[in-house]
Each structure stands twice: as structure tokens, then as C-alpha cells.
Amino acid sequence: MTAMVKTSILVLTKNEARNIRPCLEAVFSQQGVEGFEVLVIDSSSSDATLEIARRFPVRIEQIPAASFHHARTRNYAASLARGEHLVYLAADAFPAAPDWLHALLCNFEDPAVAAVYGRHIPKPGSTVERRDALEAVYGQERLVKDPRQHPGLGYRYYHFSTVNAALRRAVWQKTPFPEDVKVFEDLAIAKCILHSGGTIVYEPRAAVYHSHNHTTAGLLKRYFDAGVTWKQLDLWNAQVRRSMLQDMGRLLRNKFRAGSRVQGGQRRGRVEQDLAKAMGMFLGLHEQYLPLALKRRLSAFHLFE
């Protein structure tokens, strides 16, 4: 008899040989949750990703690398799942404790909860910029996001991350990832869920180790794309702008206060990265005034190709 599957863990991969083993080891070490399946959706890896993944009891589906799309591929993964809860986990995100999955799923005991996302803990070797950025949006306080909390949360109201998240399958069927956005598909589906009356929970106990270091130029490009997407989704307003500026100002003040403890070049580098993010966001929000050739150079995710 086939065991009942209550939860489907969806892992998207491409050339993740370095990460897939610790990711899956952590997944299959989970306690307190029964009846889950793991699906690996692989975009034509050319390294040992699939060889390693096959050592675990996972289901593997392969797609051409050229067909990968942040929203469409996540919808495809969900369409293959059998569970009533869909858990998205990045291949380079490692659950930090054996109760990670339980901490995510227990929030669904409240029928009003449509989706849950968990904390990102910086990996060893993360830059100061990444540690500060993750601390700003992944704190230790649990958040329940519904219209009553909207005014006080600012831009954090729409923050959501499919690096480490769970959705009710029934919610996804009604509001799949919008495929008209090329990137920040998690921001797009969060808007759909919240504007349709659903509740999203940030659960800090459901933590994963996950972070990427970026160059100053890379940050400018990523935040350019963020600005473009916030505007495309019609989410940018005075409340969002004020909350972002407050956080940016706080981060800059903290860096200047700590300036006496670091060398001048390091201090300048940290400030330059924050300024690059602000400039990228500003340019993305006003991309209609930029020539197409410049927008193509500024976009990290080729939004204007």
C-alpha cells in the first residue's frame, strides 16, 4: 500500500552537486512530521547533482535548462506534487534543525493561514552586507501578515521567500505563481495571496542556512530588478518607500557607528554597497526614463531581453 503523502517538498536544481547532499540529508533528518515526499526538479545539470540526489528516496523530474522560468517552473513542480502542503526549498538552503519542517507546517493548524516562510541564517563566510540585509527581514519575531498589520509593516508586508516556504496546495490552485513576472515570483504570489484575503506567516523557528555574497555591481543590478518588479506589481507607494528608507538609514548609521572598529577601505566598501542597492532600486523604479540598452546592462536577470 502506498503511504499517504501529506506534504511535498519541492527542490529546484541546476548544477548543485556541492549543495544537494547536505540539503537532502537535512530534509531526511526531519522529526515529528510523517508522510512527505521529495521532488527534485532539475534543469539539465551537467555535474553530479542527479547522481547524488539518486542516493536519496526522491522523485526526479528533468526539464531543459532553457525552459526554466522562476514562476512557471515552480508551478510545474506544484502540479507534480501529491501533498496538500507544498514546501519550496532551495537546493543551497540547509534546514538548521530537525524540527524545521514541523515548525513550518504547524502554522497551518490555523485555517486562515495560506502560506508560511522561514528564517534565513547567514552561512559562515557571509559578508557584512548579507548579514545586515538578512537581519533586517528575517528577525527572531514571528509575524502574522493580514490587512490589520499592513500599515505597521511597510515593505515587509509583502516580503516572502520561496527559498524556504510552504503553501497550501488549495491556495496555490487558486493563486498560482504569476507567470508574467520573470523574477521575484515570491513577491508576486505574496501580493496575490494577501490581496485575496489570505494570511502569510513568517516563522523564525523554521530556519535554514542560506546566503549569497554579492559584489557592489551585482547588488546594484539585483536591486534594479527589484525596483522594476515592485513597480510592475504596483506595490510601490509612500508607505513602502518610507519603511525602506528607514531601514536603509538605520543600516548606514550602524555602519558609521562601527566605523572606528574597521579599516577605512572596509568601511567605504560597506557603505558603497548600501548606496549601490539604493541607486539600483531608484533606477528600477524609474526604468521608463532609461534607454533600452542601459536597462539591459543594468538587469541581473535579463528582464529586458
Image: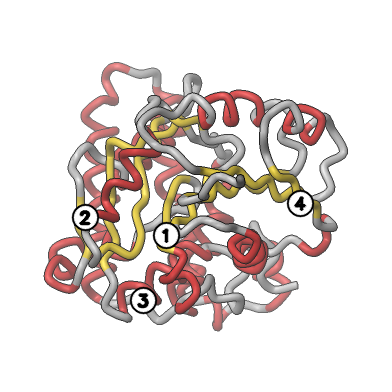
How much space separates mark 4 and mark 3, taking CA atoms? 35 Å
Q: Which label belongs to residue 167? A: 1
Q: Which label belongs to residue 67? A: none
* Quadrant into which the N terminus falls: top right
Q: Report the residue at 44% width, 29% height from top.
A: 30
Q: Earlier in the sequence, mark 3 or mark 1?
A: 1
Label 3 environment density (alpha carbons within 10 Å; few <14, some 14–19, many ≥20): some
| Front: mark 3 or 2 | 3
How much space separates mark 3 and mark 2, taking CA atoms? 18 Å
What amino acid is found at the position of numbered circle 4 in the picture? Glu
Q: Earlier in the sequence, mark 3 or mark 2?
A: 3
| Front: mark 2 or 1 | 1
Q: Which residue is mark 4?
A: 61
Label 1 environment density (alpha carbons within 10 Å; few <14, some 14–19, many ≥20): many
Label 2 environment density (alpha carbons within 10 Å; few <14, some 14–19, many ≥20): few
| Front: mark 2 or 4 | 4
SS for callout 4: strand
How much space separates mark 1 and mark 4, taking CA atoms? 21 Å
* Contact, mark 3 vs mark 1 (Cβ under 8 Å): no
SS for callout 1: strand
Residue 231, image x, y percentages: 44, 77
Q: Which residue is mark 2?
A: 246
How much space separates mark 3 and mark 1, taking CA atoms? 22 Å
How much space separates mark 2 and mark 4, taking CA atoms? 44 Å
How much space separates mark 2 and mark 1, taking CA atoms? 30 Å
Q: Which residue is mark 3?
A: 235
Residue 281, image x, y percentages: 45, 63
Vertical position of residue 167 compared to residue 117: above or below: below
